[in-house]
């Protein structure tokens, strides 16, 4: 038990200190923490005090039998107002677990209910199960029409940039008009339904309109992250068969000009439409400025498409150096919107912010999750690691703030978000990497203990297979439930059902991919699974004592770095071309205290080398030829890499050498 004097020394006033001690003496751990976090602790207190009290309150908590200690509890009001509760009452279901079971046992009915609830514009409403797939058989439609159901004068986008501190508002009417001008411009350019058009630019109001305009015209977006090097841009343009590309002259970050159009030209891209560029800046090609491309016509009739027609080609890591090309269709956005409605509890008028990019699935996810739910997208065109981003979150009155754990770690280490008013936040969400419990507790403390909805899935799912809710208590860095509408099992290395093992999804569900552009879909996801209809996902997951879950990274040779999924093969292909290197092996290692994976490179050199020098050389190669967001944490020089009898590198052995138990 802490003394009153100790609590005062930690930052409490005398009366607060006495109240805390009284609670510790009188109540059980969970009830005590609920009271302390709601009514005593505040963002003004140093996080060290938050952590001290959390650990003190739960000092006798038995995580082995009780599961991890919760840091947030839903109030009666939270539960009563939740979207999930409204649907349960409609169905006459009394518990969340029963609701999840119903959604799995009645998948077609569940998704028909969600389509009706979300107000998706379909000619008729019919969902059918066809083997491993769930199909909408309601005729042709265009999902973009469902993005403009909010009133014309409702706010669609709130935006600010590093170079302009003005908070700008774009209404639904204005966004739809700009979307239509893009669609008309594509038609004038000669694009036809089914054509692919790439987008390589940051997330701002214009790029949202470009994305929606491409889809509304019946075309498909080829997503390219603005951080990619020319080589990776060229790969995605080739796989996607893009006939044009939207980009911009440069990106400005912390006062630095980062060329973007130059990289697109170096990738030998097709015709480019370039924002923020004059004709004089164009590279002597048949490229267009944004102003010359954009049509004056603000109306456009959406092109009706087959439900499985491609709307977006996104890329994820493959088992070879070439990324998997995963198509999204006109049904995939329904999964995005449903996850936001159910698991993030988004209501009309809610403001959603998630630092992301159209090159990654969370960019399109944010568009559909916000607009189909008649919410507002909050976009900050700048670096999210600093206080300016936090001020934007404050000024935009963000209700749902999405993060990757690396970003939270940066905020915690710098203390840059202290003293801001994040009262409008009702929930955080975390995805892309394994998170660290104390960093997630820190995040919750910034907004008077709002829950963190852990959200894990993938591009080929259109959202999550495992997540949280606002009707269940939240323990830092844990998941509370499989996503509504689908389920999974865990299997050990022998293929037997287990509480700790590899994730296999039980199809069908809207959002799950059914084909790949450049690989055999069933071979990737179904070949060699413990049972024929189990769908491989590749995450390692543990079911905890209270029925919650904790993720332990990947079981294959892919990894999540800075929220970006990449394979060992992609990294090694770049690094093996460095002078003086015979071969490399890239592995992701989980830190001892949990959290984002660390990238360790094993190097077999041609001759004796200096480790600091080769690390810098490899980092430069990774930055220039793959992605500057990938950071090498450690280089290990070895004489040879361990291999199987068939000459495959045994990366599992390398990972085990660097685990916390084998430092």
Image (cartoon, helix red, strand yellow):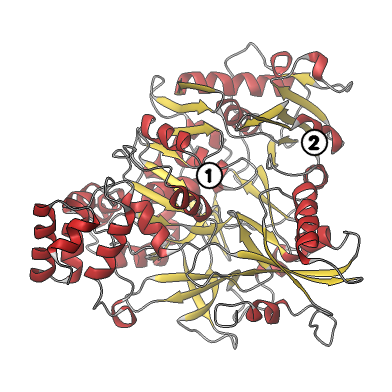
Residue 289 in view of the camera: yes
- Screen quadrant of the N terminus: bottom left
**Label 1 residue SS:** helix
- Residue at coordinates 73% horizontally, 24% vertically from top-left? 274
- Screen quadrant of the C terminus: bottom right
Give the spatial CA distance, label 2 vs label 1: 26 Å
Label 2 neighbour load within 10 Å: few <14, some 14-19, many 20+: many
**Label 2 residue SS:** helix
Residue 263, labelled with which disc? 2
Residue 138 in view of the camera: no
Residue in front for this viewpoint, 512 or 609: 609
From the top left corner, tell me how far across and down residue 427 is, in percent. Answer: 35, 48
Q: Which residue is mark 1?
A: 365
Label 1 neighbour load within 10 Å: few <14, some 14-19, many 20+: many
Q: Is residue 25 left or right of residue 266?
A: left
Q: Is residue 143 left or right of residue 649?
A: left
Which sits earlier in the primary sequence, circle 2 or circle 1?
A: 2
């Amino acid at each position: 038990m802490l003394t009153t004097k100790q609590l005062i020394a930690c930052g409490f006033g005398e009366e607060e200190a006495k109240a805390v001690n009284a609670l510790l003496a009188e109540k059980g751990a969970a009830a005590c923490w609920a009271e302390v976090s709601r009514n005593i602790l505040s963002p003004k207190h140093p996080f060290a005090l938050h952590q001290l009290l959390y650990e003190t309150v739960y000092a006798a908590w038995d995580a082995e039998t009780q599961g991890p200690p919760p840091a947030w509890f839903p109030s009666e009001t939270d539960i009563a107002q939740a979207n999930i509760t409204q649907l349960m009452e409609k169905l006459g279901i009394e518990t969340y677990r029963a609701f999840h079971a119903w959604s799995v046992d009645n998948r077609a009915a569940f998704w028909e209910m969600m389509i009706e609830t979300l107000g998706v514009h379909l000619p008729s409403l019919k969902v059918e199960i066809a083997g491993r797939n769930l199909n909408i058989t309601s005729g042709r439609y265009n999902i973009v029409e469902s993005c403009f159901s909010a009133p014309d004068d409702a706010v669609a986008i709130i935006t600010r940039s590093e170079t302009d501190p003005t908070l700008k508002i774009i209404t639904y009417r204005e966004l739809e008009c700009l979307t239509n001008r893009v669609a008309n411009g594509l038609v004038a350019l000669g694009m036809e339904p089914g054509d692919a058009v790439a987008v390589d630019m940051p997330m701002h109001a214009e790029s949202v309109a470009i994305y929606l305009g491409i889809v509304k015209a019946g075309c498909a977006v080829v997503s390219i992250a603005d951080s990619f090097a020319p080589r990776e841009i060229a790969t995605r343009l080739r796989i996607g068969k893009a006939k044009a590309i939207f980009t911009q002259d440069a990106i400005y970050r912390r006062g630095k000009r980062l060329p973007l159009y130059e990289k697109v030209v170096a990738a030998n891209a097709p015709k480019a439409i370039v924002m923020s560029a004059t004709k004089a800046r164009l590279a002597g090609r048949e490229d267009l400025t944004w102003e010359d491309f954009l049509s004056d016509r603000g109306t456009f009739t959406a092109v009706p498409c087959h439900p499985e027609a491609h709307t977006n080609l996104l890329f994820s890591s493959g088992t070879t150096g070439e990324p998997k090309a995963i198509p999204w269709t006109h049904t995939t956005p329904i999964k995005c919107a449903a996850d936001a409605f159910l698991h993030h509890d988004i209501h009309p008028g809610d403001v959603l912010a998630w630092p992301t990019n159209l090159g990654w699935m969370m960019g399109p996810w944010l568009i559909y999750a916000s607009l189909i739910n008649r919410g507002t997208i909050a976009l900050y065109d700048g670096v999210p690691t600093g206080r300016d981003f936090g001020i934007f979150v404050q000024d935009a009155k963000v209700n749902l703030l999405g993060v990757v754990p690396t970003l939270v770690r940066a905020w915690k280490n710098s203390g840059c978000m202290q003293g801001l008013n994040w009262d409008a936040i009702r929930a955080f969400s975390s995805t892309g990497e394994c998170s660290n419990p104390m960093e997630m507790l820190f995040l919750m403390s910034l907004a008077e203990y709002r829950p963190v909805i852990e959200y894990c899935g993938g591009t080929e799912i259109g959202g999550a297979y495992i997540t949280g809710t606002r009707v269940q208590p939240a323990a830092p860095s844990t998941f509370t439930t499989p996503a509504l509408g689908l389920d999974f099992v865990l299997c050990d290395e022998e293929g037997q059902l287990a509480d700790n093992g590899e994730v296999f999804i039980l199809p069908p569900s809207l959002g799950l991919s059914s084909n790949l552009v450049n690989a055999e879909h069933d071979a990737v996801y179904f070949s060699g699974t413990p049972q024929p209809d189990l769908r491989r996902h590749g995450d390692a997951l543990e079911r905890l004592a209270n029925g919650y879950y904790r993720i332990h990274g990947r079981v294959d040779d892919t990894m999540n770095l800075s929220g970006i999924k990449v394979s060992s093969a992609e990294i090694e292909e770049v690094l093996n071309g460095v002078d003086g290197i015979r071969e490399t092996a890239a592995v992701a290692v989980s830190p001892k205290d949990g959290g984002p994976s660390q990238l360790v490179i094993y190097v077999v050199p041609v001759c004796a080398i200096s480790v600091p020098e080769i690390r810098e050389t490899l980092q430069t190669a990774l930055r220039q030829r793959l992605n500057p967001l990938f950071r090498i944490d450690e280089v290990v020089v070895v004489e040879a890499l361990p291999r199987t009898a068939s000459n495959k590198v045994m990366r599992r052995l390398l990972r085990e050498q660097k685990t916390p138990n084998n430092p």
